[in-house]
């Protein structure tokens, strides 16, 4: 656990922890708040400079599969249909890949969009017939 020195008295409080600094006196800090201590001007007492990642490493975002994927696509199709912007559709009347990806936040290919768009239209027609 590293010690840090600050050039002023300061009480640091973060969601991960805190530390009370007295000017010029080495203060022990937990690793989780080192970045915050450096942010307020803290210097390691042993003179070493820690290396931090610019961005935290996170787990990759997985695309939905099966019915969850179809539900996400159908939701995007409904939004696009309600919005009815010409730039969101091809000349054939199918939503563009770009518009769908923007709403779903996962990659799709043209063939999938066409296939699911047809399934969406069939489901809408069946729902309209049941309601009548």
Image: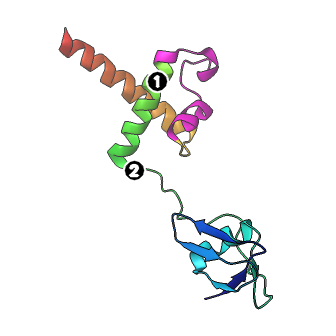
Would residue 99 be found to the left or right of residue 119 on screen? Answer: right
Residue interval drawn in magenta: 82-104
Q: Residue at x 58, y 36 (%)?
A: 102
Cα–Cα span, label 2 and label 1: 20 Å
Q: 54 or 27, which lies in front?
A: 27
**Picture coordinates of residue 13 (x, y %)?**
56, 65
Q: Residue furthest bottom?
A: 46
Q: Looking at the picture, tell me which residue is in the foreground, 3 or 83.
A: 3
Residue 123 occupies which quadrant of the picture?
A: top left
Residue 57 can be seen in this image? no
Residue to which mark 2 is pinned: 65
Residue occupying image coordinates x 73% and y 66%: 40
Residue sitting at x 66%, y 68%:
36
Secondary structure under the numbered disc 1 in the rendered image: helix
Q: Is-magenta flag for residue 130?
A: no
Q: What element carries label 2?
A: loop
Name the colour scheme: rainbow
User: Which numbered marker is on residue 100?
Assistant: none
Where residue 32 appears, as percent x and y from the top left, is 57, 75
Percent position (x, y) of residue 130?
19, 16
Asked whether disc 2 touches disc 1, contact meaning CB atoms under 8 Å apart, the reply is no
Q: Can residue 102 be seen in this view?
A: yes
- Give the quadrant of residue 56: bottom right
Local crowd at mark 1 within 10 Å, few (<14), some, or many (≥20)? few
Image location of residue 76, percent across then percent down: 46, 30
> Which residue occupies 76% across, 91% down?
46
Q: As displayed, is residue 83 above or below residue 57?
A: above
Give the residue pinned by disc 1.
79
The residue nearer to you, when weighing 10 against 124, is 10
Q: In this view, does 29 lie above or below 65?
A: below
């Amino acid at each position: 656990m590293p010690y840090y020195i600050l050039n002023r008295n300061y009480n640091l409080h973060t969601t991960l922890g805190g530390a009370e600094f007295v000017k010029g006196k080495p203060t022990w800090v937990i690793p989780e708040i080192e970045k915050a201590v450096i942010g307020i001007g803290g210097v390691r007492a042993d003179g070493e400079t820690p290396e931090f990642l610019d961005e935290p490493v996170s787990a990759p975002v997985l695309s939905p599969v099966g019915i969850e994927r179809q539900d996400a696509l159908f939701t995007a199709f409904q939004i696009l249909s309600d919005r009815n912007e010409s730039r969101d559709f091809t000349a054939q009347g199918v939503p563009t890949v770009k518009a769908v990806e923007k709403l779903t936040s996962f990659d799709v290919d043209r063939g999938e969009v066409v296939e699911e768009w047809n399934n969406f239209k069939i489901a809408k027609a069946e729902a309209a017939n049941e309601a009548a």
